[in-house]
Image (cartoon, rainbow, N blue to C red):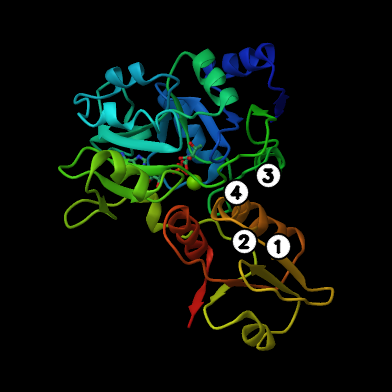
Amino acid sequence: MKTEIFRTDSAALMNAAAVIQKGGLVAFPTETVYGLGANGLDAQAVSNIFKVKGRPNDNPLILHISHINQIKRLTTELPYQLDKLTAFMPGPLTIVVKRSTLIPDVVTAGLETVAIRIPVQPIAREFISLCGVPVAAPSANLSGKPSPTTAEHVISDLYGRVDGIIEGPNCSVGLESTVLDLSCEVPTILRPGGVTLEQLESVLGHIEVGGSGDKPKAPGMKYRHYAPRAPLIITRGGLAEEIKQHNGKIGVLTVHEDVALDAPHVVFSLGNTPEDYAANLFARLRAFDDEHVDIIISEDIVGGGICEAVRNRLYKAAQYIKG
Ligand code: TXA
Ligand code: MG
């Protein structure tokens, strides 16, 4: 398939939106990660997303909209918390609400709820607005690979498999949105992400984490994810000790510790602040693939705030957590 690369000026975004309206697939930048979009009201187009990604079809998609007013058509029950969430909508927050009959089953994987997000990134908002329909979009990676935070990542996974790719800037947050279930009695975080528990509690009061009892978690959270090719070990016992135990080309991911290793081994830092860790994690995991390392050893990520989300993604990518 021929993949058209779109620039980010309005004329190019209009052409990209026309591809969505004709039932095609277009990858686009957001502040979290790149998304792979289709017309969210077109069941055939949405099912192509699953095919292209190799995504299990029991894993529902997020509908992306450009304005909070558009939520009304998509739900039978407008959540009363919506007014309090305007600081994060637009932003890296996805809400789960009761779905309306407008939404094809393939989007929600048959669930009675639907996930909705309003990206804040200007290119994303303009593109979604030009599409004129809710845009169903998962992260624009092949299923199982680290989510894409640069246009190059998307091109490497999806060039030749999708109709278009909008070549935008790197994603500033670098991790997916927080998924917050508002369809249950107490708002519940199903996936930690760009908006922190602390931020949500500051406007909503008490919220649950993880989905308790009878409520399923975000279906996508049960799959191994975000994985680089080489096995990843997280160590809590010190990098130097762990490195000694391995042969072959070693990749090391550092947070606080300083280690020096001679070539061919490679050492990548996640950066200096928790925001850096989030912005860099997926790109570093992919960079280890490019370096063809045999094993990756990472420090653990500790702490709350955005570190919750960084730790969640790192653990999902890992084979072992030691110590
Ligand atoms: O930041 C993001 O959220 C990115 C950008 C592109 O917006 N999108 C993204 O989509 O990460 P995806 O498909 O990779 O992850 C969506 C998550 C999955 O864990 C899925 O199971 C969950 O949201 N989800 C979707 N609909 C749901 C629903 N009705 N109930 C519970 N979880 C749902
Ligand atoms: Mg994903």
Percent of width and height locating residue 310: 50, 57
- Marks 1/2 in contact by CB < 8 Å: the verdict is yes
Residue 296 drawn above or below residue 53: below
Name which of mark 4 and mark 1 comes first in the sequence.
4
Name the residue at 58% across, 13% down.
Answer: 18
Task: Give the number of the mark in front: 4 or 1.
Answer: 4
State the CA–CA distance, disc 2 to disc 3: 13 Å
Q: List the residue tagged with mark 2.
A: 228
Percent of width and height locating residue 312: 45, 59
Point out the quarter of the image occupied by ligand 1: top left
Along the horizontal axis of the image, is 162 left or right of 320?
right
Q: List the residue tagged with mark 3.
A: 153
Q: List the residue tagged with mark 4.
A: 279
- Marks 3/4 in contact by CB < 8 Å: the verdict is no
State the CA–CA distance, disc 3 to disc 1: 13 Å
Name which of mark 1 and mark 2 comes first in the sequence.
2
**Res. 5 image quadrant:** top right
Give the amino acid at mark 3. Answer: His
Give the amino acid at mark 2. Answer: Pro
Name which of mark 3 and mark 4 comes first in the sequence.
3
Q: Residues within 10 Å of mark 1 (few under 14, many from 20)?
A: many
Mark 2 CB within 8 Å of ligand 2:
no
- Marks 4/1 in contact by CB < 8 Å: the verdict is no
Give the amino acid at mark 1. Answer: Phe
Does residue 254 appear anywhere in the picture?
yes
